[in-house]
Image: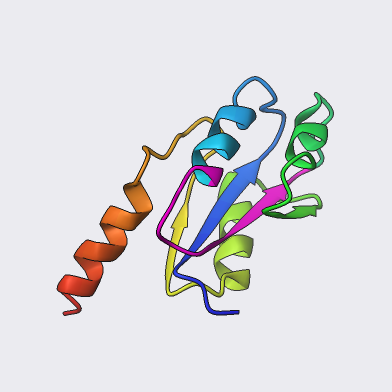
Amino acid sequence: MNVDFSIVTPSYNYSAYIREMLDSVVAQEGVTFEHLIFDAGSTDGTLEIIREYNHVNLTVEPDKGMTDAINKGFKAAKGKWVMWLNTDDRLKAGALAAVKKFAEAKPH
């Protein structure tokens, strides 16, 4: 799969925030992306919310904390550019398209 961005999200019990993050990813236009979420076994409804979004590649397994989950995501990433986005973060509309445009204009 050729994708511009791999977005890695570590997750654990963030149901209060995760929908806004997911919506901000879905709203990105002008780029291709994969969204890899590594969840350590949430029990607060987070997993049910994530499963509502068909763009997500969800892995649910124990980890050794946020850094471990991010590293798992980086190893699995297939995008040209790799980033992480925490469950309580948001992407501004057009953010990924702006990064792609800048990076392609300055490949060095």
Q: Could you say where residue 35 lies in the image, as x and y percent from the top left?
A: 60, 56
Number of marks drawn: 0
Q: Quadrant of residue 78?
A: bottom right
Q: Could you say where residue 50 lies in the image, as x and y percent from the top left?
A: 74, 39
Task: Locate the N terminus by quadrant.
Answer: bottom right
Q: Residue at x 60, y 62 (%)?
A: 73
From the viewer's perspective, is residue 98 above or below residue 2? above
Front residue of this view, candidates 83 and 24: 24
Q: Is residue 35 magenta?
A: yes
Horizontal placement of 96 versus 78: left or right? Answer: left
Q: Residue at x 59, y 38 (%)?
A: 22
Q: Quadrant of residue 43?
A: top right
Q: Could you say where residue 12 lies in the image, as x and y percent from the top left?
A: 70, 36
Q: Is residue 62 magenta?
A: no
Task: Locate the C terminus by quadrant.
Answer: bottom left
Q: Residue at x 16, y 72 (%)?
A: 105
From the viewer's perspective, is residue 2 above or below residue 96? below
Horizontal placement of 89 versus 72: left or right? Answer: left
Horizontal placement of 52 versus 7: left or right? Answer: right
Q: Which span is picked out in magenta? A: 26-40
